[in-house]
Image: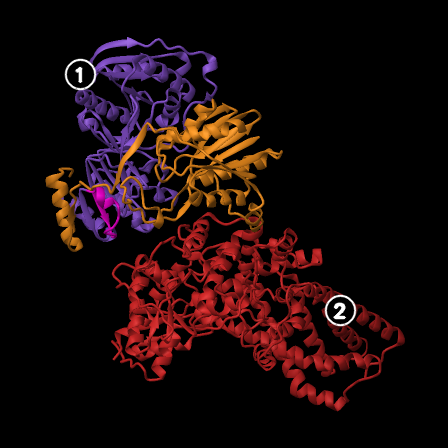
Chain colours: A orange, B red, C purple
Amino acid sequence: MKIAVLTKAIPSYESSIRVDSSEKWIDESVVNYVVNESDSYALEEALQIKEQAGDDSEVVVVTLGSEANTSKVIKDGLAKGADRGLFIKNDSKTTDPLTVAKIFAENLKSENFDLVLSGLQSDDLGSGQTGVLIGELLEMSTATLAIETQVEGDKIKVKRELESGWFQWVTLPFPSSISIQSGINEPRYPSLKGIMGAKRKELNTLESTPEAQNQSFVNLFIPKNEKVTEKIVGDSDAIVAKLMDILKNRLKVI
Amino acid sequence: MLQFSIVEQVILAVFLLSGITFFLYHLLLRLKIVLKGKSDFSVDELPKRIIRVFDEVILHKKVVSGDRKSAGILHALVMYGFIFFGLITINHFGMAFGFPIFSESFRHTYFLIFGAPWAILCTIGILGLAYRRFVIKPEALGKFSSTSALVSVFIVTLMTTYLIDELHILSGAAEKFNWWLHSGVIGGFLFLIPQSKHMHLVLSPFNIFLRPFEVPNHGAIPIDMEASEEELDNLLLDLSRLSKDQALDIFTCVECGRCTEVCPANRGGGILDPKYHFILDLKNPMLESGDVNVVDKINVEAGWECTTCQACTEVCPVGNHVEKADEIRSFQVLAEGDVPQEYQKLLRNLQETGNTEGSSSSELLNELPVYTADKELVLWLGCFAKHAMDPNFVSSVRNFVKILESAGVTYGVLSNEQCSGDPANKLGDKLTYQLLMDQNVEELNKVKNVTTMCPHCVVNLQKEYKKYHEIKYEVKHHTQVISELLDEGRININPGSLEKVTYHDPCNLSRTLDEVSAPRNAIKAAAPEFFELDESGKDTLCCGAGGALWWKKDSGEGRTHLLRAEQVIESKTDTVVTGCNFCYGMMNQGIGPLTPAGQEEIKVKDVADIVAENLS
Amino acid sequence: MILVVLENQRGKIHPFSIEALVAGQKFAKNLNCDLAVLCIGEKVEELKSQAQNFKSSKLILAKHSLIDMYSADGYSKVLSDVITELSPKYVLFGHSYMVRDFVPRVSAKLNIPFVSDIISVDFNDGNPHFSKQVFNAKLATSIEISSDQALLSFQSAAFSNDDIEEGEPESEVDFNVQLSDNDIKSKSEPEFQESSTGVDLTAAELIVSVGRGIESEDNLPSMESLAEAMGAEVASSRPVVDMGWLPPYRQVGSSGQVVSPKLYFSCGVSGAIQHVVGMKGSKNILAINKDEDAPIFEIADYAVIGDVLEIVPKLTEEINNSK
């Protein structure tokens, strides 16, 4: 079975996120790029599926972006056990998910993957569409927010997470593109052998030219906080008195 | 005088020889396994070692300690009884072959002065210990031990038969029977000792002699990124092997359970049981395989609970270095890629940003002067202070700076200070550790004197790094600097208020760095009403943040910070002072929620705080 | 024309779809065009009868046995056909898990951009800009479309269902659904729950919510007493459920319940985005937290910076005394 894991390099949660001078993107020089969290879960799921299949299945870690930001993402995937890496070079700031998906689909088509796994969304732009878009473009079956997967012969069963504590099992034929919810498994840490062996694994770089986007950022800005917040201060007795006033007289809830 | 026929002599000879052979066989079997271990035994500082054997074996300092003082005294009675007795035993057998060693009168005199009193004391000792083990049944001693039961019976029999013999109570066949019973028991010991914990009789003096002085004493694991696959395989294989010291420790273990009793993880409700997980679980695997490749038999979950506080090693009366979290974690991380989820982020932060918090900048670092070659001291901040892991501690750093300035000490910070790597080292990720260590050593070897407020940093910069690199600089803990300044008269401390003040010894400072007096020197000058907590000094109870457990905050069980904070609250102190930023943070976390309603919340201070407040 | 797609939530119109309908009504007014409302797939008859209470130009029914149960294959094919036939300029949805699952299929099938999780719309004289949060809500972006059509989904509470215009559809039509077995490659099983629901927080008028700031499970009873005194339901953030202090059905957030009570009274809740998404539609938000930088204060109407463990018991006492 051939499995692709789509992995994105995104700014770490602790990084300073500042709008750059163009006002259309962030200042990348102060950012530390890390593997998108749900993509780690997707990679782990792929590796577990490969280990259970036992045969000569292949896990390929695929990423798209600029070289500087994405090289560590591929190394991380290879160190953890992916068999090879595919780096699709794109130095433009493509924000339209459909445009991104088309680049992926064009480059992955010839590989004929049985399974494409991706994190449910990336923690930078968070559209959460890429996996499904690629699935449609490559004529695959799709499912999102998988919290469990079971391969059964030529099909894959997926437990989808729904709202409010509901779930649903869906059986999909291969080829399939599935987005993975965080918490589905416990991602492994690369072993020493893995880290050192990663250097020897195959890594291919593909060039790409993105199409014109249909949706784009006009600008990026710090969200205005329009809410008028009334601060209640004092010692606890004073606070309690004020709260009583609010609850009783203003909100009329008691 | 008893007479022995040829037949009896032959039987005795065969019996004794088979006993001795059995004993030697099992002893040598174990020693053979031990010698397969990694690295060499430490035999440095011979005089210090001899004195230590005297203190711990003859003076029984570690046995008569803690909660077990009375049991320790009873054990001393048994041990001395044995020693005094042993001299006479040779005579006992010599007699059978017609070669008594001592004359009747000597034997009689010996009996009156040493023999009888010690036989009685020894009997009291063993009966007391048997009562404790079989009637009181303390939990630490574990389940019913048949060997202990046998030993108790043997010793009582031995002493009784000895007394009967010397007092000439019996005659004829009964006397002969008594003699054979006595011999049978002594021979019986030869069969009993090697396969039981009673091997400690033979091994512990040696084990105590050979015990490494460095605590902890885990070996370096240098990793060459350009190593060949074969070299890498050897390194990984090595990770599963114990050192000679560790292997000898395991055969010496007397199963007393003191290590488990003091373990903060165990006391905090965790599953870690050092006696089994770090020692006894490994014994049979070693005997079965005939080799020391048993690290993978250490319970992994227990290994992750360890705070590496070394209380277990400190308390062991037979010279064991108990803790093996370093070994099992290194094995899990490097060979298996098995790192608990909560630590993966921590390790990635270290790799990507050189600090534990994944931060890209530090306010504190920016506000302090930069080190230049003309300054006396490098002030090493450590991630905790640098990234305000407890925001209150930042003011403690400022207080230390105030002390330095008032003494006219020039200092500066290193702008490219990386994490000392302690969390990576303690978690077994030696690769990340090396990354950070190599960068730091390069910078630090350009300077001479370093001080820091974090004992974990001191341990790594000074002691751990030395295992991998040549170290040209010297590191002092800030309490040592303050204490020196005080002694040299460069600062003056006025006694402060009369509130009750106590000190919590950080485990890294008191045990690993062997420093308990410098902080006290400083605190006592500032606090006239200073008193000691239970479990203070080198017996301190770890705050719970060690072994990288600070970052394992979100789980429920095995939470050790509750224990020490609870003890501090029970002591009814007004202020608790500590010398480590992690202890400081843990106290702040524990004391708030645990203070009973109506009681005033105890103030938490660092040594620098209480000194700065009372500088004149 | 604006097309709003209504989603089924166990026999009722999903609250997010109602909000999308509010958006649709505003769009139609602003851009001066028709508003069509589509009931598709599951429980389509129930959806239709509820949709008949709201003002629209056209109510469309897309019913077929093969989409009686939701599937991404089925819904995306049928919706694509509807869009191809009606050529709406904008297709509006609530940003629900279901929409995330099938709408991107439509986007790729028809080559129409899908702008998802929109928090506000600036109509901008006929060239609307859509705002959404990025980089963990540290920043926001304004998005413009350069194609003729777009698919749009709105974050919960971007529009308020209080603003719904009641009335009735001007016309009703059945869409001729073309579907065969081959179109649906996946097989779905019925939805199920893992833990028993005791309480429907979405129906609660008053909610007292607890977060990690209450510090210990031992402090929970005093929070529950407050809820009792106020006649409120108890809810929590995810960490509290993860630690086992409360059962999962009490969880409010993106993977828990989405609530919009009259008053959301939070105790020791920090306000992480996954939680906020579940309660920002509340009419009034009152937050008590020790940390003045807690994100919850940015969306709170009343901010109490103080020790919840001290304040709550006193407040409970006062409320009980005043009864």
Residue pointed to by mark 2: B24
User: From mark 1 to mark 2, how far is it between C-alphas?
Assistant: 100 Å
Residue pointed to by mark 1: C167
Task: Determine the image quadrant of residue B85.
Answer: bottom right
Give how far across and how far down residue C304 sits, in percent. Answer: 19, 49
Give how far across and how far down residue C28 sits, in percent. Answer: 20, 20
Query: Which quadrant would the C terminus of chain B be assigned to in this image?
Result: bottom left
Q: Secondary structure at mark 1?
A: loop
Q: Is residue B14 left or right of residue B602?
A: right
Query: Which quadrant would the N terminus of chain B be assigned to in this image?
Result: bottom right
Q: Amino acid at mark 2?
A: Leu
Q: Chain of mark 1?
A: C
Between label 1 and label 2, give the one nearer the viewer.
1
Does residue B28 lie above or below A220 as drawn?
Answer: below
Please report the bounds of the magenta region as a residue range: C286-300
Give how far across and how far down residue B501 sits, in percent. Answer: 31, 73
> Could one spot residue C323 in this view of the protein?
no
